[in-house]
Image: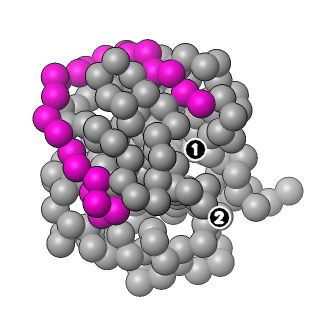
Amino acid sequence: MTSPRVLVVNNGTLSLDQLCRRLQSLGAKTETVRCSQLPDRLDARYQGVVLSGTKVRAHDIGYYRPLIDLVMGSKVPVFGICGGMQVIATAAGGQLEPGPQRVGGYDVQVDKDEPLFSYVKPTVSVFHRHTFYLQEAPEGFRSIGRSEYAPVEFLRSHDGRIYGAQAHVEFREDGLEILRGFTRMFG
């Protein structure tokens, strides 16, 4: 079986190397590209796209327009992590709200019927490092994970192609198993 190729879009995360190592440990070949240097469209060599966290505020839709167009125009599974999820959600009309600063491990309840969570228990411990939260899923999406602080910890498009995680799944054991669920979606 051929290893799946994943395009990892670097939105300025501090943990890009950790994210790529995690995906590679699951058998994926990764290729990284900066958000500012995206291709106009994906070619057939990619089986998935992962959007890293951000340093720039996710609601800057003008800055992220090429990324949004690439994600919405692709046919492969997409997984937005932290700011990557927030970019997807705000582009779809979601609103980010300030909240308490959370850094460290937090428990999240997930919908076990989702393929993303095939390898975890109904409560996962994931790593957070942020202060903005999505309070409800935008049109075309639904919440598939929630916590005491955020009703949308995980997000899925209605067609099941686009996923998002408020958490940094490149850390912690449950994060690895969530990434495993994502990599098993490649056709």
User: Closer to the N terminus: mark 1 or mark 2?
Assistant: 1
The majority secondary structure of the magenta stretch comes to strand
Q: Amino acid at mark 1?
A: Leu
Can residue 12 be seen here? no
Camera-near label (1 vs 2) is 2
Residue 35, located in which quarter of the rendered image?
bottom left
Disc 2 marks which residue?
47
Q: Residue at x 65, y 64 (%)?
A: 47
Circle 2 Cα neighbour tier, 10 Å, few/some/many (<14 / 14–19 / ≥20): many
Based on the picture, tell me whether residue 72 belongs to the magenta stretch: no
Query: Which label sits on residue 38?
Result: none
Q: Where 165 sits versus 51, above or below? A: above
Q: Amino acid at mark 2?
A: Gln
Q: Which residues are magenta?
A: 90-111
Query: Is residue 49 found left or right of 181 in the rendered image?
Result: left
Q: Residue furthest right?
A: 1
Query: Is residue 143 found left or right of 92 in the rendered image?
Result: right
